[in-house]
Amino acid sequence: MEAPHSFSLLLKLLFAVLLYSLCFASVGEAIYQCQGKCEDISDCDGLCKRFGFPSGNCMPPLYQYCCCHG
C-alpha cells in the first residue's frame, strides 16, 4: 500500500529540515579565544572582560585553559 501524497510530502519536508539543521548547526555557536592556562591567570573572567569579551572561564578538558567567549 502506498502512502498518501500529503504524508510523503511531510516526510520530505522533515528530512529537509533535519538536513538543514545538521549542516548549519555550528553557525550560531559561541567563539572561544583561549588566553592561557588557568594556573597562570588568577581571574579568568576579569581578564576576558578587560579584553572586551562578555565573560570567560576555565574550559574542559581538565578545566586548565582560560577561554573568553562572546
Image (cartoon, rainbow, N blue to C red):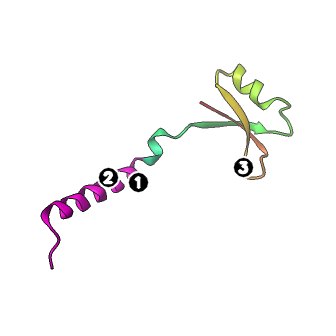
Question: Which is nearer the N-term, disc 2 or disc 1?
Answer: 2
Q: Amino acid at mark 3?
A: Pro
Q: In the rendered view, would you say 49 is above or below 62?
A: above
Residue 3 percent coordinates (x, y): 17, 71
Circle 3 — which element? loop
Kindly identify the residue that appears in the image at 75 percent across and 25 percent down.
Answer: 47
- 39 lies left or right of 15: right
Q: Are marks 2 and 1 in contact (CB under 8 Å)?
A: no
The residue closer to the viewer here, 56 or 51, is: 56
Q: Quadrant of residue 53?
A: top right
The tag on residue 17 is 2
Report the residue marked by disc 3. Answer: 60
Disc 2 and disc 3: Cα gap in Å?
31 Å
Residue 22 badge:
1
Numbered range of the magenta stretch: 1-24
**Residue 8 magenta-drawn?**
yes
Task: Tell me residue 30's x, y (percent).
Answer: 56, 37
- Label 1, secondary structure: give it: helix
**Nearer the viewer's eye, disc 2 or disc 3?**
2
**Label 3 crowd (10 A; few <14 / some 14-19 / many >=20):** few
Q: Position of residue 65 (x, y in %)?
A: 75, 42
